[in-house]
Amino acid sequence: MITKVLLKLLAVSVVFVALPASVTRADEAADKIAELKKLREKIATLHMVATSISRSGSGTRESSIETWEKNADGKQMFKRWVTAKTEPGTPKEQTAAPSLMIRDGVTAWRELDLGDKKLVFKGKSETRNEYTDLEPLLSAGVAKISKGDKLLDQPCVLLEIREKANPEDIMASYWISERNGVVLKSIVESAGATITEMKVAELKVDEAIPDSLFTYRPPADAQIVEDKSAKPGKTD
């Protein structure tokens, strides 16, 4: 009888011990993400070269991305140049329209070169980085932090975001530098079963970048579409 009572007490204690452990792991992940985000926000300037490959049922798109960023006096200046091709390495390979995005701290511009004309979107400049797009996924899923591979000679943590209803299903994976909080690699599954993998090839932080790099004037023949309510495009 005494043995049965002890076993019941032990089972109950295991349940009560397991629950706080789960909560603790979630808290630790949240604390680590907040720590990495603060490191990222401390970067004064950034120059980054990356590649991105998106695969879906409709095909493959490969992009080359070069980014410049400058944070000073409470405002962010940002420039991104993207060239892309669809169905790379196949007879169907085509060069996609290049795009330029510039935020000068006041106005956000996005220019698309359509060949026969240029289309320019104009909106309000906002401060954004990788975490701007990452945080909605964190809210929708469950985060797990572990040690990641070393990238660009920098130690990384691996952040996996899993579905709440199905923890075995990984929605997104991010390799984040422990040195500066920059996302150096990501694999994200989005709508339409599209899987996008991004990897940084070159990274320089806190080196001089002139403000003139973020100056933009729309081409005289460009069609300008202004949307004062819309947010600028994603960072990736």
Image: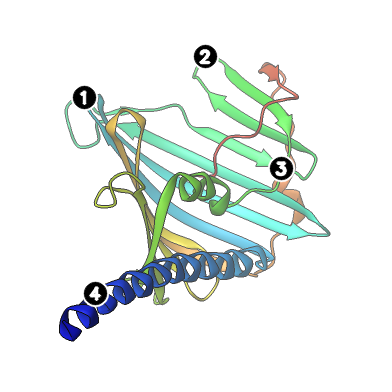
User: Disc 2, disc 3: CB below 8 Å?
Assistant: no
Vertical position of residue 230 compared to residue 40: above or below: above
Q: Distance between the residues labelled 2 and 3?
A: 30 Å
**Residue 141 spot, x, y in % from top left:** 41, 48
Give the mark nearer the N terminus: 1 vs 4: 4
Residue 92's label in the rendered image is 1
Q: Distance between the residues labelled 4 and 2?
A: 77 Å
Give the mark nearer the N terminus: 1 vs 2: 1
> SS of the residue at dot 4?
helix
Closer-to-camera residue (132/103): 132
Q: Residue at 36% of width from left, 75% of height from top?
A: 17
Residue tagged 4: 8
**Residue 178 spot, x, y in % from top left:** 48, 74
Q: Is 11 left or right of 63, judged from the image as shown?
A: left
Q: Which of marks 4 and 2 is in front?
A: 4
> SS of the residue at dot 1?
loop
Residue 126's label in the rendered image is 3
Circle 1 packing at 10 Å, graded few (<14), some (14-19), many (20+), is few
Q: Give, as a three-letter code, the residue at label 4.
A: Lys
Residue 116's label in the rendered image is 2
Q: Which of marks 1 and 2 is in front?
A: 1
Q: Nearer the viewer, mark 3 or mark 4?
A: 4
Residue 228 can be seen, yes or no: yes
Closer-to-camera residue (206/213): 206
**Outermost residue, right direction?**
73
Q: Distance between the residues labelled 1 and 2?
A: 22 Å
